[in-house]
Image (spheres, rainbow, N blue to C red):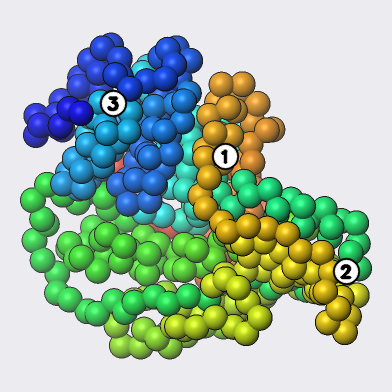
Amino acid sequence: MDTLSRRDVLRGTAAAVSWLAAGAAGAKRAPSERVNVAVLGASRGAALARQFAALPDSQVVAVCEVDEGRGYKLAEEIGAIQGKAPPLVVDFRTLLDRSDVDALAIATPDHWHAPATILACLAGKDVYVEKPASHNIVEGRLAVTAARKYGRIVQHGTNLRAVPYYQQAWELLRQGIIGKVLLVKAINNQRRGRLEARPDEPVPEGVHYDLWLGPAAQRPFNYNRFHGGWHWHWEYGTGDIGNDGVHQIDLGRWALGLKAPKAVSASGAKLGSRGDAQETPDTMVVTWEYDDLLFVYEQRDFTPYRMPGHRHDNDNIFFGESGFLMIDRDGYRVFFRGGEPGPTAGEPWHDSPRHYQNFVDCVKSRRAEDLIADIEEGHYSSLLCHLGNIAYRTGRRLEFDPHTETFPHDDEANRYLSREYRKGFELPAI
């Protein structure tokens, strides 16, 4: 396996072109039959890069990371999988006009998800974007518009949709196995650590911090707002409802074909993170109101235990007129009135290649309708997360117009629909 020299990062584009011209030693198919993917981010992006490098008809042609040290390590790891290390690129925008890049896999902090997706669509690239699809509702809808207008394939990172037994369970619900569903509960129940306060500090060597900030306001560097810690700061992340809760929210919405609700309310607190530097709540209860259904989200990031009767940290429960269905990453179970057990199925979950292969297949076929998690599906699931955060931050029940995706006659709530973009990082016109 070739290793990266420091010169590679300074010659990112040239290195990538020369590498592609020479071909990859470990490739399984001809380059013309492979989808060339550039991976943005080396945290969750590392898992994406491994998946796309291992598939027979895709390859990683660039690792893009603003922290050079992490980028080098990931590029070398991917080289061990596909035979030659892809070059490190710092600024993803240099990839947009390259004919040797077919798609971007975006695993940056949340505040870059939608802007990078939109820019990629405008440049004629396909996109795999991690969840949540956006940092706010307006830019999420713009990402959908850009994908449609420019005919791009855009897959959302809600990869649980690739597990077959979820669709089996949804079919049981459609057949009325528990009668009409009246309440859905999505549960995000896990242990998160504290984010102890620390002072600002100089930007570490090899970190391109201004590019990392991107659309966000200029602020001094602080590790609490950098790797991992950004999840818990409003300027960059969406809290755990957007980080992990979006998976369960997506499943509950997908099962019943739900889109935007007519109202939302939320309460939340910092229970396990009292006094630390985290801004977002570690504990939340959100309720989205539909015409004949309530959808509830429960989040407990302080708890070290699972609830009795639950097999997994995170799951969904569908309550019907004649029973309930519990489903988690290991399978589903049905219980009828009185506790009588019904059908059950499943197996231990693992992140299989199916979600990523589906994206590659659709890039090649140009059939967006075959995507497991199209960008508009990702937008609606992310929208529910944003609505929960907005209700928490305003402290009241909010009526929502699902057609305009705004809050009627509520200027305070509407201010959270978008953000102020830093000069030089504004959203492009579509």
Q: Is residue 111 left or right of residue 152?
A: left
Instruction: Identify the image quadrant of residue 176.
Output: bottom right
Identity, as a three-letter code, of the amino acid under mark 3 = Gly
Taking the spot 59% from the left edge, 28% from the top edge, the residue there is 362
| Residue indicated by mark 1 | 354
Secondary structure category for the residue under label 1:
helix
Question: Are there few (<14), some (14-19), or many (20+) residues within 10 Å of tag 2?
Answer: many
Q: Quarter of the image for the N terminus: give it.
A: top left
Marks 1 and 2, how far apart at CA: 30 Å
Number of residues whose C-alpha sits closer than 10 Å to that of mark 3, classed few (under 14), some (14–19) or many (20 or more):
some
Kindly identify which residue carries mark 2: 178
Residue type at mark 1 is Arg
Determine contact: label 3, label 2, CB under 8 Å: no
Mark 1 / mark 2, whichever is N-terminal = 2
Element assignment for label 3: loop
Is 387 placed left or right of 425 in the picture?
right
Residue 184 position within the rendered picture, expressed as x and y whole percent measured from the top left: 74, 71
Q: Which residue is mark 3?
A: 83
Which quadrant of the figure has residue 175? Answer: bottom right
Can residue 297 be spotted in the picture? Answer: yes
Pick whichever of labels 3 and 2 is earlier in the sequence. 3
- CA–CA distance between discs 3 and 2? 51 Å
Dot 2: element: loop
Give the residue type at disc 2.
Ile
**What's the CA distance linking mark 3 and mark 1?**
22 Å
Q: Residue at x 70, y 53 (%)?
A: 165
Near-viewer residue (405 or 367): 367
Q: Position of residue 329 (x, y in %)?
A: 60, 61
Residue 275: image location, x then y, percent: 31, 88
The mark nearer the N terminus, 3 or 1, is 3
CB under 8 Å between discs 3 and 1 = no
Horizontal side of residue 235 vs 290, given as left or right: left
